[in-house]
Amino acid sequence: MAKKLGAPIFLGVFTILAIVFLTGGATDDTDILRQTFQIDAIYYDSGYVEVSFFDTSDKTSLVVMEILGMDESFQKTFSGSEFIEIVQFPYVPKYGWATHPVILEVDHDEFGHIQIKTEIHPLGDPAPPVIYARQ
């Protein structure tokens, strides 16, 4: 039972932190982060999600990507400043894509440790907002 509560608890804590950052509870340096990091997570009807990440500064050394809310959370580590990852996702979630956030933990030579959160969206739909946090 506790195993199934881990992802929702983490998602709740992350959402609270995101609200603090979005409402000005931290330094407002998200403009430079938005210009530097490009991320998208697109669901294709053929049953997969394509997650893409690109660092325009080319100063990212490591990225840990996780997709939460799945029966078994997907996690993968990447080195370098860009990647495209295909993840099998054969169904559209009953409660919407917000139940499966894509979280990136980024180690950047200039900015330090950055957390990035976005949501999956179907091909053709607008990309949801991306949330950035510095530690």
Image: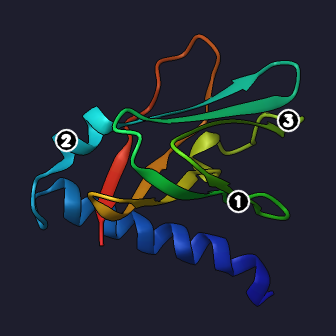
Which quarter of the rendering shows the N terminus?
bottom right
Disc 2 versus disc 1: nearer the observer: 2
Callout 1, which amino acid? Gly
Give the residue at x 85% y 62%.
71
Question: Is the Cβ of the residue at disc 1 closer than 8 Å to that at disc 3?
Answer: no
Pick whichever, 94 or 37, lies toward us: 37
Callout 3, which amino acid? Tyr
Callout 2, which amino acid? Ile
Which circle marks residue 69 in the picture? 1
Q: Earlier in the sequence, mark 1 or mark 3?
A: 1
Residue 49 in picture, x, y percent from top left: 74, 33
In the rendered image of this protein, does residue 95 appear above or below residue 49?
Answer: below
Q: Gap between marks 2 and 3, in whole Å?
A: 35 Å
Which circle marks residue 32 in the picture? 2
**In the displayed structure, does residue 73 sit left or right of residue 11?**
right
**In the displayed structure, does residue 122 sit left or right of residue 4?**
left
In the rendered image of this protein, does residue 64 appear above or below residue 59?
Answer: below
Residue 24 in picture, x, y percent from top left: 9, 59
Q: Secondary structure at mark 1?
A: loop
Residue wearing tag 3: 91
10 Å crowding of disc 2: few (<14), some (14-19), many (20+): few
**In the displayed structure, does residue 58 sit left or right of residue 24?**
right
- Residue 114 found in image quarter: bottom left
Q: Gap between marks 1 and 3, in whole Å?
A: 13 Å
